[in-house]
Amino acid sequence: MRMRLKLKTVFVMYFMVSLLGLIYALMQLGQRCDCRDHGMSKDQQISHLRTELQKLQEHIKTSELKKTDVPKIYVITPTYARLVQKAELTRLTLTFLHVPQLHWIVVEDAPQPTPLVTDFLAASGLTYTHLHKLTPKDRKLQEGDPSWLKPRGAEQRNEGLRWLREMGAAAEGKEAAALEEAVVYFADDDNTYSLQLFEEMRYTYRVSVWPVGLVGGMKFERPVVEDGKVVRFHTGWRPNRPFAMDMAGFAVSLRSVMTNPEARFDGDAQMGFLESSFLQNLVTMDDLEPKADLCTKVLVWHTRTEKPKMKREDALQKQGLGSDPDVEV
Amino acid sequence: MRMRLKLKTVFVMYFMVSLLGLIYALMQLGQRCDCRDHGMSKDQQISHLRTELQKLQEHIKTSELKKTDVPKIYVITPTYARLVQKAELTRLTLTFLHVPQLHWIVVEDAPQPTPLVTDFLAASGLTYTHLHKLTPKDRKLQEGDPSWLKPRGAEQRNEGLRWLREMGAAAEGKEAAALEEAVVYFADDDNTYSLQLFEEMRYTYRVSVWPVGLVGGMKFERPVVEDGKVVRFHTGWRPNRPFAMDMAGFAVSLRSVMTNPEARFDGDAQMGFLESSFLQNLVTMDDLEPKADLCTKVLVWHTRTEKPKMKREDALQKQGLGSDPDVEV
């Protein structure tokens, strides 16, 4: 009986202990695998984290890597050394940085690339190509010449076109296919560009056109559109020029540039005929694609920056007190 | 003995069964919690997802919601209606959009807010406050007056300061604490600003200073720094003015503006003394905080935009052929 009792006691105790152990193990099982971490099971946590991750990835795709599948815009900008050059390039860069898929082709009117432009472009954060082409002396404006006497930037724009045609001819496969959609725009470094302008020009079949503000002695010049077609030009001077538009008022498809290899700017063109010298090789007026709400919105302005006076600088320099030439302006 | 054996058997069997149960439970514990889903336990998955999520959040923080914990910059810009106004505001906006934590205070020189500026600001994407303050007629430049005859924008800058002081006085708690760090800059709408400029001014204790390019008939004007202190001003004209600096060449802490409620721009100040009229209420030359590599870098340019000629517009308008007045330029 003592033995029995003892065994019974051992049995009961073992039963209790092992039961407790089992309960504990089962609780652990429930807790660790269903373990509520902030009230969520692991499966719920994983699905929650996955959703969060997806949301963020979506967000980044739409906000940052945004619109990489839109046609490229090649912007050709002739530039030349002068006091306001860095300031102008700065403003232009801060505009272009907002534009998706923009490739900037900067063409210096210089015998070789200048350190200022080279360093500037390297730090700009833009995708760019840096070219240079010196305007022959006989075609260049001389000090004191009125700015309209000779067209400026013709050689540089042609150099940009040459680079584009070479690049286009060398492209293959997917790259070549993407170029089929690309657009070319001639953006002088002193104008003012809205962001909307670039979205207007982005889909250009041959030549797209729009108004330009503050140009040619006018509030704006623009193609006049009737029934969706350009029928004439609103301009204050010789409206019967083939394309009475400013350089800032049109973009051309890279396809047109490639298929019309003879199209270029004639540096000897009569005043006001530089744009026409290029465009008449590409299209007729009837082909023009009016943008900016059928040419009723001004999205680009032909602003001009004053040449800064250096009267005091010159006076101080004569006394050896001029501004430190090592400081880039 | 039979009883004993029976009990022993029951005990042993129970022992075996409960042991098996325990072992099974422990195995389950191991398996279910270590269960490999694509070769990873849930814990590993969760930690992996958490890491990914953190990386993306970090990425977004640095790229987009970037630097929301830096001091705010309040930029006060006086502006007035003219042909190039919208173009200038466009360039300025496209610069400011790159600057984190910038609050634009636009003060029109007008009896009431104009539709052009109102609509422009609403579409700008910037954080802004739109104010207006008409300059009294006797303080205003008249047509044909040289631009230096009367200081421009004094009333508007003071209106911006008034708004800031009111806003600052009304702020409470966390908001008030954040304002302790804020900076105030006076940015005219025709200058050119680099992005680096805003990072230079961002931490300003009282008044920070730097060079300004293309101003006052000079390549640049700047505070001259010796042993980390501003000792004089490099300028082409009256270098002994209390603060011989252009408006674009300094920023002040909001704290200084708040603790010196009498500091304002004197619209009647002698030519070239407008900046001094404000600054001498805030600091001495010794207090100035030189920025931009001890004032050796030009990060802002006092560019001026040419007033567009409207010769042809006027001629056409006389014939009733002027540009459509409904088109905003």
Image (spheres, coloured by chain):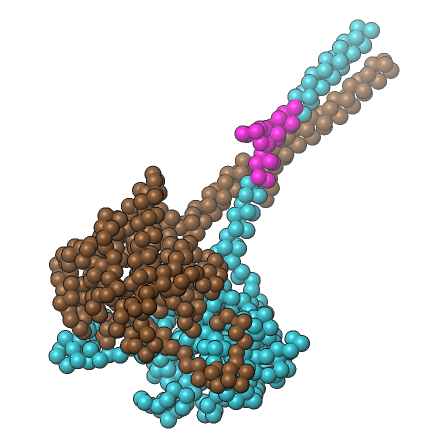
Chain colours: A brown, B cyan
- Most extreme residue toward the right, as rendered? A2
Is B35 in the magenta? yes
Residue A266 lies, with reference to residue B271, above or below; the image says above
Q: In screen coordinates, is A260 left or right of A95?
A: left
Q: Which residues are magenta?
A: B27-48
Is A248 in the magenta? no
Question: Residue at (46%, 90%) from the top-left corner?
Answer: B271
The N terminus of chain A: image quadrant: top right
Residue A40 percent location from the top left of the image: 56, 40
Q: In screen coordinates, is A213 left or right of A15?
A: left
Residue B257 percent location from the top left of the image: 55, 80
Residue B322 lies, with reference to residue A36, above or below; the image says below
Pick the front one: A50 or B299: B299
Query: Is any atom of residue A292 visible in this view?
Result: no
Q: Quadrant of residue A241?
A: bottom left
Question: Residue at (26%, 73%) from the top-left corner?
Answer: A148
Pick the front one: A145 or B22: A145
Q: Quadrant of residue A141?
A: bottom left
Residue A167 percent location from the top left of the image: 34, 48
Pick the front one: A222 or A242: A242
Query: Is any atom of residue B307 visible in this view?
Result: yes
Question: Residue at (33%, 61%) from the top-left corner?
Answer: A156
Residue A91 percent location from the top left of the image: 41, 67
Residue B248 lies, with reference to residue A193, above or below; the image says below
Question: Residue at (12%, 59%) from the top-left corner?
Answer: A227
Q: Quadrant of residue A244?
A: bottom left
